[in-house]
Image: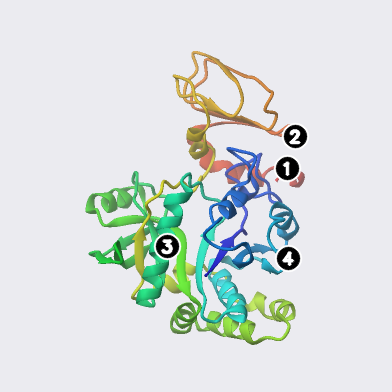
């Protein structure tokens, strides 16, 4: 069994702490460990380090390697350029097929917050059993806490018991809905959040690519059979379609299964999401540093200088982030516009 951790992409939602060269999974928000390191930590005792692969981009490769010195050099798969999650899956499958064509693979994002390691590993065990018993791609379904329009959704069918676990067929993958549609999903009761976690065998994934995305299948086979993988990637990766795995494969595929997550989960979409994990006062002010507040409520503060004290007077619903070279002050209800703000900054601050 192998794990592939997807550690590419860029994000502005945690600016100014995150930058182009330091995306979300490089951040240490709640401890000294980064989100990427915490993802690797959750696999301890479940998957051997030599079977944990990290897929990242050429622009982040050196930084990612430095964060994970415990992993062998050959376990870092580096994309020559960004090509979204469908290409990442094909690249992962081809790379692992070279090592072990019969392998079962767990694919995980690098930037989620999952407090319980035990519950997380137990859910993955259930997903692995379902994938191997049914020769299917299995995804992890997250029970929705609210009608969030920022997530994709899984429409699930009637469950069946297998090896003591409930397994449910995925009837359809739904893209991020409107807020009104998300409310309807919750009312129907058979929709879950799509967390982007998958379990598949190499053979099942290759067959899925063959039937839904022939270009990705040809790339995967070519990589598996190539004598020089770096040369093959440099010559062929740019031609791989830039599309998400859900859109290219999962929305067209039948027979996909889901197991329900038995763990608390948060994708940490931005400062507003992270704020609830910081210490807070009786008025909803939270932060990673000592706070003093008067007539202030529902504010989030963060500073890279943990000896700094922050005082709040007569303000409500703000996000305040200090990184030394930049200071963010914005309303919580405007945080989704951070990408717009960052685009107008000098390049060295982006």
Mark 1 or mark 4: name the one nearer the start of the chain: 4
The answer to whether marks 1 and 3 mark residues whose Cβ atoms lie closer than 8 Å is: no
Mark 1–mark 4 distance (CA, rounded to whole Å): 31 Å
Where residue 216 sits: x, y (%)? 55, 79
Residue 92 visible within the image: yes
Near-viewer residue (12 or 104): 104
Residue at 52% from the left image edge and 27% from the top image edge: 279
Task: Give the side of residue 29 with respect to residue 160, left or right.
Answer: right
Q: Distance between the residues labelled 4 and 3?
A: 27 Å
In the rendered structure, find residue 270 and report the number of the disc placed on it: none
The residue tagged 3 is 125
- Residue at x 59% of width, y 29% of height: 288
Residue that mark 1 sits on: 349
Per the image, label 1 sits on a secondary structure element best described as helix
Is disc 4 surrounded by few (<14), some (14 to 19) or many (20+) residues within 10 Å? few
Examine the rendered structure and indicate whether residue 185 appears above or below residue 281: below
Q: Do the residues labelled 2 and 1 touch (CB within 8 Å)?
A: yes
User: Mark 1 or mark 3, which is nearer to you?
Assistant: 3
* x then y, percent, for residue 186: 28, 50
Q: Name the residue under label 2.
A: 325
Secondary structure state at the residue bearing disc 2:
loop
Q: Nearer the viewer, mark 4 or mark 3?
A: 3
Identify which residue, 243 or 99, lies in the foreground. Answer: 99
Q: Is residue 51 above or below residue 272?
A: below
């Amino acid at each position: 069994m192998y794990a592939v951790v997807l550690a590419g992409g860029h994000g502005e939602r945690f600016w100014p702490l995150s930058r182009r060269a330091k995306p979300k999974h490089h951040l240490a928000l709640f401890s000294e460990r980064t989100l990427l390191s915490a993802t690797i930590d959750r696999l301890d005792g479940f998957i051997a380090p030599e079977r944990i692969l990290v897929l990242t981009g050429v622009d982040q490769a050196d930084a990612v390697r430095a964060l994970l010195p415990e992993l062998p050099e050959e376990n870092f798969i580096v994309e020559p350029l960004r090509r979204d999650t469908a290409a990442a899956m094909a690249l992962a499958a081809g790379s692992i097929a070279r090592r072990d064509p019969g392998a079962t693979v767990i694919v995980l994002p690098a930037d989620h917050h999952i407090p319980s390691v035990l519950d997380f590993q137990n859910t993955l065990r259930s997903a692995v059993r379902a994938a191997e018993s049914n020769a299917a791609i299995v995804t992890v379904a997250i029970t929705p806490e609210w009608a969030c329009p920022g997530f994709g959704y899984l429409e699930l069918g009637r469950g069946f018991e297998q090896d003591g676990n409930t397994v449910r067929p995925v009837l359809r993958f739904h893209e991020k809905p409107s807020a009104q549609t998300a409310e309807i999903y919750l009312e129907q009761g058979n929709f879950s959040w799509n967390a982007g976690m998958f379990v598949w065998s190499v053979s099942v994934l290759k067959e899925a690519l063959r039937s839904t995305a022939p270009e990705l299948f040809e790339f995967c086979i070519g990589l598996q059979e190539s004598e020089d993988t770096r040369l093959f990637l440099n010559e062929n990766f740019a031609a791989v379609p830039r599309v998400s795995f859900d859109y290219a494969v999962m929305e067209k595929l039948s027979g996909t299964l889901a197991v329900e997550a038995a763990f608390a989960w948060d994708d940490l979409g931005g400062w507003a999401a992270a704020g609830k994990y910081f210490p807070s006062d009786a008025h909803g002010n939270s932060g990673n540093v000592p706070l003093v507040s008067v007539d202030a409520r529902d504010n989030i503060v963060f500073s890279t200088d943990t000896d700094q004290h922050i005082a709040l007077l007569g303000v409500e619903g703000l996000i305040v982030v200090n990184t030394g070279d930049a200071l963010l002050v914005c309303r919580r209800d405007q945080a989704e516009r951070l990408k717009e703000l960052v685009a107008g900054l000098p390049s060295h601050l982006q």
